[in-house]
C-alpha cells in the first residue's frame, strides 16, 4: 500500500503595494498633495489580516524649550535637543494599532506616535544605581515623557504627525487602499512608505517604497544654493538687504 503523501505546506502570506506617485514636486504654488497607496494581500489560507501603512519623512533635529516663571518674567528654559524625529509621520491602519499587535511589537517596529524612536542624547548620563554599573539615565528625569510628548504635539499641531485607525480600507477581497495627505509645510527630502501585513498580532510581510519630495524651478535653485553654499547665500542675502535699504532711503529723501 502506497503511503499517503502529505500535501505541500501553504505558501506564506505576503503583501504587495505601490504608490500612485513616487515624486512630489514643490513649486511656489504648492498647497499640499495626496499620495495613494494601493496594495494586495496574497494568502491562499484566507486568514484574517491587518495592514499598517507608515509614511515618514527625513529625520530632523528638534530644539524645544519650556516657559519658566523667573522673578516675575516668563523666560525660555534651557532648550532640549531631540534627535531622530521624522519631519513627517503618518500611520494608517485597518484597526487601532493596539488591537493589531501588542505593545512590545509596536515598540520594536516603531509603529504609532507613542513608539517613535525620539531621543535626547545630550541629556543622557551614565550612573551606578542599585549596584548596577553603566546604567544610562536621562537628566530630565520624570519630565522626559512630558518633553517628548511636547515634540509630538507640536508636530501634530503643524499637521506633520498623525495616526488614522481607519486609514487603510479593503476595497475588495485582498485589495486595500490608503491615502496620505502631505501638507504644504511637509519637509523636502527622501520619504519612505512602509506597508506591513499582520496576522495573529505578528508581522508576516512588509514592503518599503521610496518617495521623494523636492523643490522645482526657481525654488529648487534657491534651495540648493542655500544648502550647498550657505556662506555665499548669507552674503548675497545681506547685500540684497543693504541694497534695498539704500534704495528705500534714497527714495524717501527725494520725496
Image: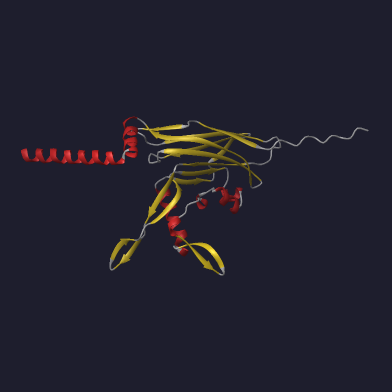
Residue most extreme to the front: 133
Marks counted in the figure total 0
- Residue 42, located in which quarter of the rendered image? top right
**In this orientation, does residue 73 appear?**
yes
Position of 146 relative to 245 (above/below): below
Q: Position of residue 165 (x, y in %)?
A: 54, 46
Q: Quadrant of the C terminus?
A: top left
- Identify which residue is drawn at 40% across, 36% down: 32
Q: Is residue 203 above or below residue 74?
A: above
* Quarter of the rendering occupied by the N terminus: top right
| Side (left or right) of 50 relative to 209 | right
Residue drawn 30% across and 67% down? 70
- In the picture provided, is 118 more to the left or to the right than 206? left
The image quadrant of residue 34 is: top left
- Left or right of 243? Residue 207 is right
What sort of colour scheme is used for the picture? secondary structure
* Residue 228 image point, x, y percent: 34, 38
Which residue shows up at 40% across the image and 38% down it? 188
Q: Does residue 255 appear anywhere in the picture?
A: no
Comparing 15 with 131, the one in front is: 131
Q: Identify the residue at the far left of this view.
A: 254
Q: Residue furthest bottom?
A: 130
Question: Is residue 108 or residue 16 the one in the foreground?
Answer: 108
Amino acid at each position: 500500500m502506497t503511503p499517503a503523501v502529505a500535501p505541500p505546506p501553504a505558501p506564506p502570506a505576503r503583501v504587495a503595494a505601490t504608490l500612485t506617485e513616487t515624486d512630489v514636486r514643490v513649486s511656489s504654488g504648492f498647497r499640499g498633495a495626496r499620495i495613494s497607496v494601493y496594495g494586495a494581500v496574497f494568502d491562499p489560507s484566507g486568514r484574517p489580516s491587518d495592514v499598517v501603512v507608515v509614511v515618514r519623512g527625513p529625520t530632523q533635529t528638534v530644539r524645544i524649550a519650556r516657559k519658566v516663571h523667573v522673578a516675575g518674567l516668563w523666560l525660555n528654559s534651557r532648550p532640549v535637543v531631540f534627535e531622530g524625529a521624522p519631519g513627517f509621520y503618518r500611520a494608517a491602519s485597518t484597526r487601532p494599532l493596539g488591537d493589531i499587535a501588542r505593545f512590545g511589537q509596536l515598540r520594536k517596529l516603531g509603529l504609532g506616535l507613542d513608539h517613535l524612536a525620539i531621543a535626547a542624547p545630550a541629556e543622557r548620563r551614565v550612573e551606578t544605581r542599585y549596584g548596577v554599573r553603566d546604567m544610562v539615565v536621562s537628566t530630565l528625569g520624570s519630565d522626559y515623557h512630558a518633553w517628548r510628548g511636547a515634540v509630538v504635539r507640536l508636530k501634530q499641531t503643524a499637521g506633520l504627525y498623525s495616526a488614522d485607525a481607519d486609514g487603510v480600507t479593503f476595497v475588495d477581497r485582498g485589495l486595500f487602499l490608503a491615502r496620505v495627505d502631505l501638507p504644504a509645510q511637509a519637509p523636502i527630502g527622501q520619504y519612505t512608505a512602509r506597508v506591513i501585513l499582520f496576522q495573529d498580532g505578528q508581522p508576516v510581510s512588509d514592503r518599503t517604497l521610496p518617495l521623494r519630495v523636492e523643490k522645482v524651478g526657481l525654488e529648487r535653485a534657491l534651495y540648493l544654493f542655500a544648502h550647498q553654499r550657505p556662506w555665499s547665500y548669507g552674503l548675497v542675502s545681506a547685500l540684497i538687504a543693504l541694497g534695498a535699504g539704500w534704495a528705500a532711503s534714497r527714495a524717501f529723501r527725494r520725496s
